[in-house]
Image (spheres, grey):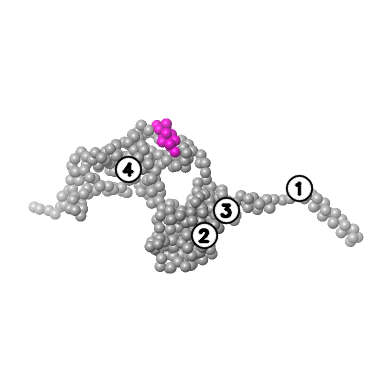
Amino acid sequence: MTTNRRARSPLPKHVTASRDRHGKIRLRFRRAAFSCYLKSAFPSDAFDAEYQAALKGEKAARGEIGKKRNPTGSFAALIASYYGSPEFRGLSTATQSTYRNICETIRRLDGEKPVAQLQRRHVKSMIGKLSETPAAANNRLRMLRILLRHALDLEWIKTDPTAKMKGYKKKTDGFHTWTEDEIAAFEARHPIGTTARLAMTLMLYLGQRRGDAVQLGWHLVSGTRIKVRQEKTKARLEILMHQSLIEAIEHIPRDQKTFIATSKDEPYSAAGFGNWFRDRCDEAGLPHCSAHGLRKAAARRLAEAGNSANYIAAVTGHQSLKEVERYTRAADQKHMADAAIETMPARSDKQQQLSNAAAELDKQADKELN
């Protein structure tokens, strides 16, 4: 008696076979948020090694070249595993790109070193190479912490050598915050109607990151409001457009994909826009200014107008009020100090003199009435 029961696949769990356009059979591992192709022949010891690595969420090296690139238990293998983890895949595209840049530097410098033998002195040496650039050193330390937490999850290590390790104190406040004179200089060089002026106006009056600014267009405008979905934090904002911004976008065709577009009427990438805007700043004689500095300038302006950190965060989308306060340190101290001093009462002896004078006037008025 024959049946139509489907024969059980000899392949292990989570592995499927398919034929590519060249007719070659390809084996693919799929599990939860991670997938990869297994390039070794099945069955074989090499396939078993790849399969076990895939179960741990890592893309193991294939062949001798791969083994040299990602030795078992090495930082290179840990980084490959982290790229396939739900933690990494759940990040925004922009954050993934930032993390990859740092990870690939670690891979290039220390990729073959065994993770299990890492000690605190090794970590200090790895970040100490960047002592002249404290921000970069701290970013590497943060990335190492993330990687080593992943190593703990994989049970490659039992303790985290970066625990309670302090980074460098920052020598600067990061990107330069545009001053009013610098804003005026840029406006003088790039008048209304130019893409450069439009780009500056968008960021200055909305306080958004460059990666979010390049995505804005008419499809997000409703009346005098514009909707923003921040790529980094996934925050959804609805912001009232300032009259200066409304005037800046009036000439943009309604069928244009985004307000800021390339010469081919295509949206900019965040990095591409940053490079393009860098050139526009140079043209205005502002080589120290940047697109991100306009976001800080927007926060500064809001702070100088007397807005609270909560109000500022409602515009910029910051999730941490501490971060807002860091941004607004560049608020015009002189202007705000003057306004604060004006609210203070007069000195006590002067107040007493005024009170005595008023009392004397009352006495004279009483005498005249009598």
In-front residue for pair 112/144 = 112
The numbered mark at residue 80 is 4
Query: What type is the residue that disc 2 sits on?
Result: Arg
Residue 305: percent from left, percent from top: 59, 56
Q: In which quarter of the image is residue 13?
A: top left
Q: Rounded to the nearest whole Å, what is the CA distance between mark 3 and mark 1?
A: 31 Å
Which residue matches tag 2? 189
Numbered disc 1: secondary structure? helix
Query: What type is the residue that disc 3 sits on?
Result: Ala
Closer to the camera: disc 3 or disc 2?
A: 2
Which numbered disc, 1 or 4, marks the residue that appears first in the sequence? 4
Which numbered disc, 3 or 4, marks the residue that appears first in the sequence? 4
What residue sits 33% from the left and 39% below the top? 76
Residue 325: percent from left, percent from top: 54, 48
Q: In this view, does 2 lie to the left or right of 201?
A: left
Residue 310 in sight from this viewpoint: no
Q: Residue furthest right?
A: 370
Q: Rounded to the nearest whole Å, what is the CA distance between mark 1 and mark 2?
A: 52 Å
Q: Is residue 225 above or below residue 38?
A: below
Query: What type is the residue that disc 1 sits on?
Result: Ser
What residue sits 22% from the left and 39% below the top? 46
What residue sits 53% from the left and 47% below the top? 326
From which residue to which does the magenta span run?
A: 119-130
Quarter in which the C terminus is drawn:
bottom right
Which residue matches tag 3? 303
Which residue matches tag 1? 348
Numbered disc 2: secondary structure? helix
